[in-house]
Amino acid sequence: MNGAESLVRTLVASDVDVCFTNPGTSEMHFVAALDRVDGMRCVLGLFEGVVTGAADGYARMADKPAATLLHLGPGLGNGIANLHNAKKAYSPMVNIVGEHATYHIEHDAPLTSDIEGVARPMSDWIKTSTSAADVARDGAEAITIARTGQGKIATLILPGDTAWNEGGEPTVAAPPPAREKVSEESLRAAADALTGGKQTVLFLTASALREDALHLAGRIAEKTGCRLLCQTSNGRLQRGAGRVSISKLPYPVDMALGALKDVDNLILVGAKPPVAFFAYPNKPNVLTPEGCNVLRVSWPDDDHLDALARLADLVNATGSTPLLQAAHRPEPAKGVLDVDKLAACIGANIPENGIVVNEAVTAGRGFHAATLGCPPHDWLDLTGGAIGDGIPMSVGAAIACPDRPVLCLEGDGSGMYTLQGLWTMARENLNVTVVIFANRSYAILRHELTNVGAENPGRKAIDMLTLDRPTLDWVDMARGMGVDAAKATTGEELDALLKRGLSTPGPFLIEAIYTP
């Protein structure tokens, strides 16, 4: 068989059975192999940012990598922003990137580029296959790397002749190495801090935010009186009634400083030391107070569940009963929509076992508090700050979990980056309800203009931050891509449309028009 078919058979045999694609000429033999080999679901995205974002959402919910198929360096470049988000979320992914035939590269055709150079910043592993005989082995190595630790991005570059030449032989990826156990020394230092009578915070992210790990963290908190806090943006947080609740570090610098102002010990479980998203004049970059003792229990790739279990033993918390979140929903809002009424409507409607994908950059500031007591659900954040991940992530999450409703909370400015994902939702008939929070501007940037001290913005500055002249019409755009849609301007309308979208199969979009 040829190299392309050996690679597809290796992927399928290694339980990589979804491929998000946007192929070109160099990848046609791989396309033909995907068609010939049973067991691989192929999902077309009309832009590479949809492809990589969907693979991110899929990985977060499936706990395994999908493959992507991208066309040469420019295609990979188009998908870079959501590869950045995926890397910050520690999402496993196997990118298959086409390349010119090895003997054609020297001619510097129009699409020739340094693909490895394009891939390097957003990849944990890169390899260019050199022959058809190498392709399956290289693919198996990519799969193993992608599954290592919390998750890695592996990029395999496939020259055309290595795909079409004969000599391929399928293989199966080796299992990844076991996740590292943390040292007894770091755990004892954390235990001493937790039992020393000072204000202590357990600061968590990554798989430490899954229900079983949070249960252990809740036991530790109940026994020692420490606070539980997680990063502002996280790949996946399991939350809701009956689970251990955890607060998020606020995004605004002043609020984050307030949340940490009295902390004597900050214990990192998978997390990085908290810093501001950006530098601001006359404000600190590091958010921990002076004199705060920062201790690391685990790195992102470590075994967080084991670390928290051993830490619970050290502080005698194994038998403690953690405080669980009580069930509570806000009442649906009434009247003209604003950010508080948006939060109330969302909190009133999150479905049990739902998946919430949150890229409501401006509107979503109040969503965390309003949704704590909703039925158990998973919450996926924009982890890397590169906007345009919400709609594609929802595609991937819905494909990973077809029996679970997906609620996509999306800003109108962010949504325009990858609105092509709506077409994929329609084609695949995915159970996604998309809420577009339409304030007709990049409202968060209006706030940032003030935060960084830029004074007296004029017409040109304001025009760069507003989405009017013409006004976007998300209902028309959604319908043009095959997704049913409707507008809401009041709490009553939004509540009714959310109930409609979440109770009926297939995709549905709501344009919620509000005043920021």
Image (cartoon, rainbow, N blue to C red):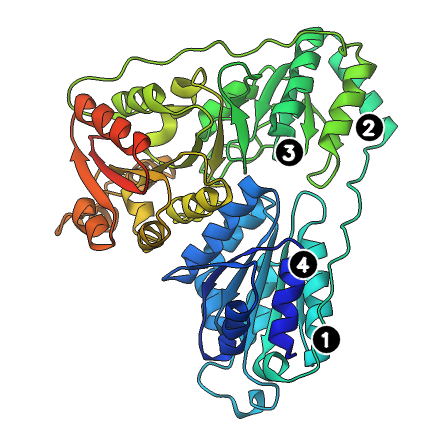
**Which mark's residue is nearer the viewer, 2 or 4?**
4
Inter-mark Cα distance, 4 to 1: 17 Å
Q: Secondary structure at mark 2?
A: helix
**Which mark's residue is nearer the viewer, 4 or 1?**
4
Q: Is residue 168 visible?
A: yes
**Which mark's residue is nearer the viewer, 1 or 2?**
1
First of labels 4, 1 by sequence position: 4
Name the foreground residue: 131 vs 290.
131
Inter-mark Cα distance, 2 to 3: 19 Å
**Which mark's residue is nearer the viewer, 2 or 3?**
3
Please state which amino acid type lies under the numbered disc 4.
Ala
First of labels 2, 3 by sequence position: 2
Horizontally, is 197 left or right of 436 in the view? Answer: right
Please state which amino acid type lies under the numbered disc 2.
Ser
**Which mark's residue is nearer the viewer, 3 or 4?**
4
Residue 480's image quarter?
bottom left
First of labels 1, 2 by sequence position: 1
Give percent across and percent down for residue 305: 72, 28
Inter-mark Cα distance, 2 to 4: 39 Å
The residue at which mark 4 appears reads as 13
The residue at which mark 2 appears reads as 186
The residue at 68%/73% (across/down) is 135
The residue at 57%/58% (across/down) is 39
First of labels 2, 4 by sequence position: 4
The residue at which mark 1 appears reads as 134
Q: Secondary structure at mark 1?
A: helix
Tags 2 and 4 touching, CB below 8 Å: no
Give percent across and percent down for residue 349: 33, 23
Inter-mark Cα distance, 1 to 3: 34 Å
The residue at which mark 3 appears reads as 207
Inter-mark Cα distance, 1 to 2: 42 Å
Name the foreground residue: 125 vs 505.
505
